[in-house]
Image: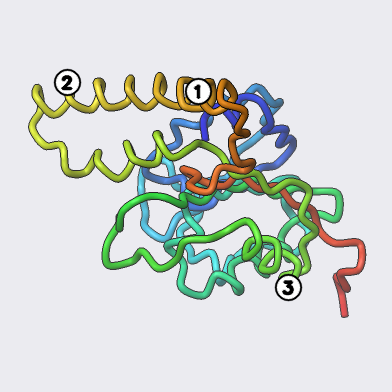
């Protein structure tokens, strides 16, 4: 996700960061000209500007130049309402930048509701009045395996060493896997059938009735 933020995040102007109250580590990778970031979260915190649910934002229509929604959508049961609200508060020329995990264990329990495929994200965005720009599966089966194993590796010192070793194996394993498949004449499936997560961007659809 951080690599996609570094390479592809082009949010500008007034940016709404949904659910970023606890950790906003991704912002340090953003190279865009972020004039101001308004952080909204369902729980109050030192970095939270607006305490509200994504399904009912106390924000004006067409008030945001860009919206960021990372690792949040899977925790919102009424995700259609959340996407519709994002569409409502974004300016017609604004863009949404999002990330959802795919191959990962239950987290934030009991409020962990969904996993999305690229096909389901496309339909959800279109239903909400948003036009998909990019929906990209990221990661691979090795990194996904690491994500699944990580919660089971406990202990401060031993756990940290094992996590580092597992991550190194994941990073080395994939290029070796692809190289061996090419060597025997097989092509690696694109996109990977076991992505770590899905990056997506969207804009307000030109067909959306903003004031009807």
Spot occupied by residue 9 in the image (x, y as percentages of width and height): 67, 33
Near-viewer residue (113 or 42) = 113
- Percent across and percent down for residue 150 are 25, 38
Left/right placement of residue 170 relative to residue 67 reads: left
Q: Secondary structure at mark 2?
A: helix
Q: Name the spot of residue 109 as percent of width and height, x first.
A: 27, 62
Counting residues from the start of the chain, the first of labels 3 and 1 encountered is 3
- Estimate the spatial distance between the alpha carbons at disc 3 and disc 1, rounded to whole Å: 42 Å
Q: CB of mark 2 within 8 Å of CB of mark 1?
A: no
**Mark linked to residue 63:** none
Residue assigned mark 2? 161
Q: Is residue 47 left or right of residue 178?
A: left
Say whether disc 2 or disc 3 marks the residue closer to the N-terminus: 3
- Position of the C terminus by quadrant: bottom right
Q: Residues at badges 2 and 3 in contact (C-beta under 8 Å)?
A: no
Q: Residues within 10 Å of mark 3 (few under 14, many from 20)?
A: few
Give the CA distance from mark 2 to mark 3.
Answer: 45 Å
Q: Residue at x 48, y 47 (%)?
A: 194
Q: Considering the numbered disc 3 on the image, is that residue within a helix, a strand or a loop?
A: helix
| Residue 178 vertical position relative to residue 105 in the rendered view, above or below | above
Nearer to the camera, 33 or 118: 118
Closer-to-camera residue (117/154): 117
Report the residue marked by disc 3: 127
Q: Which residue is mark 1?
A: 180
């Amino acid at each position: 996700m951080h690599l996609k933020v570094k390479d592809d995040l082009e949010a500008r102007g007034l940016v709404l960061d949904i659910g970023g109250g606890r950790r906003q580590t991704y912002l340090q990778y953003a190279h865009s000209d972020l004039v101001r970031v308004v952080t909204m979260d369902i729980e109050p915190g030192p970095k939270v500007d607006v305490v509200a649910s994504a399904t009912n934002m106390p924000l004006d229509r067409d008030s945001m130049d860009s919206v960021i929604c990372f690792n949040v959508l899977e925790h919102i049961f009424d995700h259609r309402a959340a996407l519709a609200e994002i569409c409502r508060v974004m300016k017609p020329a604004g863009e949404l930048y999002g990330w959802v995990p795919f191959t990962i264990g239950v987290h934030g329990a009991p409020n962990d509701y969904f996993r999305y495929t690229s096909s389901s994200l496309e339909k959800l965005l279109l239903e909400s009045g948003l036009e998909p720009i990019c929906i990209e599966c990221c990661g691979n089966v090795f990194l996904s395996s690491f994500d699944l194993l990580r919660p089971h590796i406990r202990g401060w010192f031993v756990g940290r060493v094992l996590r580092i070793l597992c991550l190194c194996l994941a990073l080395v394993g994939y290029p070796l896997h692809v190289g061996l498949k090419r060597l025997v004449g097989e092509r690696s499936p694109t996109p990977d059938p076991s992505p770590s997560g899905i990056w997506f961007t969207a804009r307000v659809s030109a067909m959306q009735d903003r004031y009807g």
